[in-house]
Amino acid sequence: MSPPDNAIRRFSTFEELETAFRQRTVFAVPRQYGGLRRFWEDFRQLHGSDGMDTAARAKTAWITINPRDCLAFGTAEQVLQAAVLSAGTVPEKGQTTVAALAEAYDLTRQLSQPLRTLSGGETVRLALAKTAASADQIERLTIASPFSWLSSEGRRHFDRLTGLLLNRSISVELLTLDGEDSLEPITTSTAWVGGPRFRLRFDKAAFLLGTPLDDIFGRQTRAVIADFDSELCSPCLLTGGNGKGKSLVAKVLAGAIGCEGAVGVGRSRASGRARLLFQDVVTQTLMRPPVRLAAAKDDMAVYRLIRDGLPEALRALTPERPDRGHPAEAQSLLVVKMLLAATRVSDRPGAVILDEPDWGLSRTAAVGLVDSVVAAAHEWEVPVILISHKPWWTASAASQVRVEKGISGSTEDRVRLSFMLQVMEAQ
Amino acid sequence: MHWALRWWILLAAGLPAFIGYPEGIWPGLALQGVSPARLTHGIAIYVLIGVCCGGGFLAGAVSAASMILLPLVVAGAGLSYSFHLTGLAYPGGPADYSPHYVALVINMLVVIPLALSLVLTIPFSRFETRLLRRHDGVTRREKYTLMMLRVFNHIAFSVIPAALEVVREERWGDLGRRFRRRSRGEAAASHRMGSTVAGLVHLASTCICSALCFVPLWALEIAGLPERARQRQKADHDDRNAA
């Protein structure tokens, strides 16, 4: 069951949504976007007398726009255990309840995984499961922008939770970005036609999931990407459901995850590396000073190309010269994405990967931004790879590759996870 | 290997590094200011850490040790040289103080990875899970323990890996390559160098912010865990007595 229409509030920008969300919920995490000054202001406030009182806090549940920000523990099992413990479930059935929650929200195989390694959709499901555990204690749930993370298959979990809460007369408030929940494909843009052809290659690619600390305790998982060598046309859509490994493959291509074997993408011999825009650009920018463009010509030239390609309404929201004098808090999420895209395209990498580029943007802004970045990249002869679980781009992409995840039981070389890429037929 | 066995082996083998080396065992100098015994012990410790904790861990620990000691040694040596130039100390010049800094580098390169391996070999995440598996609630002391474990595990398993991913994607480790780049022109290369250094410096401060960011949220959730019945009864009993 979905929340009633009067419980859904729609916003045109990430900043408006975040402000409204913080007004409605417990102010428990300082803002990580907009620079260090804003971060420390928020942090000091959290230790002050502002915010809800304890009784009100206990009756309010919330799921943040980045779902990791509302989960206090390190693994999925710990989050659910704490939720069950706080809910006061009958002790001898506590463990069963954790298992039952995990099964209900398709998290059984993810229980022991660190939160950081869960996909966005899995993290949202975990937040939903945690809320379900505390359904007896809460009076209200506020959720921000879950559809940026949940695939269409995952929406049934969201509907299950809202149905459970509404049946108990618990109010559910959904804050979303305009058009975020749409499943309609976008119309084909001329910018997407005639893009550069490029080669994507994986040859005996293998990597370790986890940290060196996990290796000490024998917890590192070895993963392989099945051999793949194909010529594709830009923009290429890398698609698949939640938790199938799309972002992992992107990070391997971009070198963010170290990898054995041969991995390459590029126009000639696929010997280059990709540059990547994370889905969560807030984490990617790491609260650093405003993203700056190089004094040299290239970054600014690409930024101008991207800006000029935006629809007029969006262009009015972006500065012509995002250089010195613009503090971090003045840089909106849209502008940060444009700046990150400009710095990456100007590097002329083997490809630029946009991981779920619609995150934090309304549908109009997302389509306008992606259109503009693709056009600018093609003008610089840089291939573009889009990653998305949404069907928005399927009709427009020049080529599509589907990512699937398998689990191997081989003990010879401890392979546990395998990722397969498959070129999809053009629609 | 069980973590406790690993820990005791590292502690026993590494004890000379913390309490001082038996320098007299092997007379002479391997390097200026460094005895053969100290150097051999250092190499043996590295082998032991590699065997007990893995090569990846050892590489990370050595990197961390290098990042800590480099500014100290460079700044210290610079200060010593300025003393020599001004005549305040070290009349013999760098030959007077270089053995001290060589010994300092070797010492830190051994002690820091050893300390890291002793701390990080303890499975703190398992302790966290075990505390939360209790069905009868959590004592106040356990809540404080949970909080400390949370901070540690968050830094070790979330902050540092996330930062490393960003560094790798930004290629901030390629300082040498940027020095040699000529294809995009000097202005672009020097800007990239400048932004790389600035980025690495800022990375340190944002790692601190990332480590602290969720402390209020953890405090909220951990405080909300139910107290164990025995402690609640004691608290009620104390209240009645006071009344």
Image: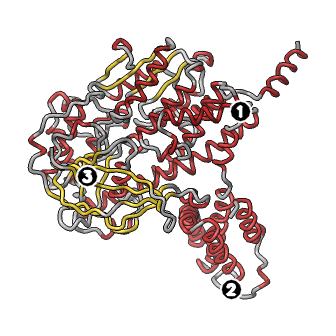
Q: Are marks 2 and 1 in contact (CB under 8 Å)?
A: no
**Left or right position of A251 against B227:** left
Position of the C terminus of chain A by quadrant: top left
Which label's residue is closer to the chain start, 2 or 1? 2
Q: Amino acid at mark 2?
A: Leu
C-alpha gap between disc 2 and disc 1? 60 Å
- Mark 2, Cα crowd under 10 Å, few <14 / some 14-19 / many 20+, is few
Q: Amino acid at mark 1?
A: His
Q: Which residue is mark 3?
A: A352
Q: Are marks 1 and 3 in contact (CB under 8 Å)?
A: no
Residue at image location 43% in from the left, 44% down from the top: A286
Q: In front of the other: label 2 or label 3?
A: 3
Q: Position of residue A138 (x, y in %)?
A: 56, 18
Query: Considering the numbered disc 2 on the image, is that residue within a helix, a strand or a loop?
Result: loop
Q: Which residue is mark 1?
A: B135
Position of the N terminus of chain A by quadrant: top left
C-alpha gap between disc 1 and disc 3? 49 Å
User: The disc numbered 1 marks a residue on which chain?
Assistant: B
Q: Mark 1 and mark 3, same subunit?
A: no
* Residue A286 vertical placement versus B112 (above, below): above
Residue sitting nearer the eye, A352 or A315: A352
User: The disc numbered 2 marks a residue on which chain?
Assistant: B
Q: Which residue is mark 2?
A: B29
Query: Considering the numbered disc 1 on the image, is that residue within a helix, a strand or a loop?
Result: loop
User: The disc numbered 3 marks a residue on which chain?
Assistant: A
Is residue B74 in view from this perspective?
no
Q: Amino acid at mark 3?
A: Val
